[in-house]
Image (spheres, grey):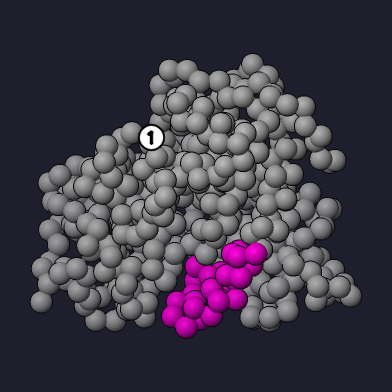
Amino acid sequence: MGRTPPTVRSPRLVQGVEFAVLRRRAMHTWTSRRGRVFAIDVPFFGRSVVVSDPAVVRSICAADPQRLVNVRPNMSNLFGSGSIFALDGAAHHERRRVLAPALRGHRLAACEQIIERETLRECATWPDGVEFATLRPMSRITLNVILRIVFGDAPDEIAALRRLVPPFMRLGQVLAFAPAPPPWIRGCTPWRRLDAFRADFDRIVTTLVDKARADPRCAERTDILSLLLRCGRCEGLAALSDELLTLIGAGYETTAAALAWTFERLRRHPDVLADLVREVDDGGAALRRAAVFEVLRSRTVLDVAGRRVEGPTIDLGGWQVSRHRTVLIRIADLHEDPENFTDPGAFDPHRFLGVKPAAPTWLAFGGGTRRCLGADFAITEMDVVLRTVLRHVRIHTDDAADEKSRFHGVTNAPKRGGRIVVDHRTEPSWPPT
């Protein structure tokens, strides 16, 4: 029989505030006092076990997915019951099997041209010699890319979604883990606006579905909408819309935040930047890919991954966790642990040269059966955006203080938006609008 994790004893409301608002500081305090496995009791997630011990994390990643299901509440509160976030067991496995080919392998090579084109289009608007925040430009790039990959060539509808999705996701991140109010007062709360956004999204998706079904070349199309229509795995239009919203919502903001952190880091590390520019000019890629891994380690965008114990009590690495308890893996603490990474506070891409980071110590995309489906796609997108930017603009470096992190409800992004100053290196032939 495993041990019972030690418990944080402060009042539930106090723990909830610390977890939601002062999470990093609270986690450091709790870990120093209770160890790398301890229990808390917070609103929404309830009685939970927090883990930053690699051995226990390994057991979580390897656990039977029927006994350790997705955390509740989760992002299906925002994306809908047809989202992969709402599925467990065989249904979750089948959905992953259907979606995985669209985001891996040879399809990634086909996406590179789209990513490069959108990056060049955005770079063309950047001012020379004037400081600006990169978070919004990166969000525009990643949103445009994921919309093209999901829906293909649909300029009118994509333009409408380009306007709709950002405010929808900004509000949705705030409300995603909060319990929805009863219907009789929902219309007097922020959920009313969220419902309006969702209705607009569903109308646009309905139009796109009708057009795809009427397209005589639908069987030849490579966009994800056509793939899902051909395989028929989403039960009805509502479930299909849920999954498409999931792919868009999960596929652009996290990567945009990681890219903004990338430029925030390079501004403050001239030696790394110089090495990356030389590599780009020489046609290389190894250090750039290592830099992507190091950004995702040192500036963790999603700092917690959650599961929920289903069925009887489960033993995780020698710790006994009761039924219906939430298990929260502290990704940020794993990434900052000196036992996992030498000098973890340093930004050193060379630590990943020739080394592919993996669980249980590197969990930028989670682990186990619920590892992010879009991990390979996100890494490729970051790599292509960084390569394209370094080819065409010169980033100024200085000794500016590190930007602090700001929590946006789901993601952690640079507080000042990842600000940089650039000059254009070349006068490229910008793609047509």
Instruction: Please report the residue visible at 41 percent of the width from the left and 35 percent of the height from the top.
Output: 405
Instruction: Please report the residue visible at 54 percent of the width from the left and 58 percent of the height from the top.
Output: 376
Quadrant occupied by the N terminus:
bottom left
Instruction: Please report the residue visible at 70 percent of the width from the left and 61 percent of the height from the top.
Output: 150
Q: Residue 430 or 256: which is nearer the viewer?
A: 430
Q: Residues within 10 Å of mark 1 (few under 14, many from 20)?
A: some
Secondary structure mostly taken by the magenta-highlighted segment of the chain? helix
Residue 347 point in image, percent of width and height = 38, 34
Examine the rendered structure and indicate whether residue 233 appears above or below residue 118: below
Quadrant occupied by the C terminus:
top right
Residue 44 point in image, percent of width and height = 36, 59
Instruction: Look at the image and give the residue range highlighted in magenta.
Output: 82-106
Rendering quarter of residue 89? bottom left
Q: Which residue is mark 1?
A: 347
Lateral position of residue 99 relative to residue 31, left or right: right
Lateral position of residue 131 relative to residue 10, left or right: right
Lateral position of residue 307 relative to residue 34, left or right: right
Residue 79 point in image, percent of width and height = 57, 63
Q: Is residue 91 magenta?
A: yes
Residue 38 seen in render: yes
Instruction: Please report the residue visible at 77 percent of the width from the left and 32 percent of the height from the top.
Output: 428
Q: Residue 59 or 385: which is nearer the viewer?
A: 385
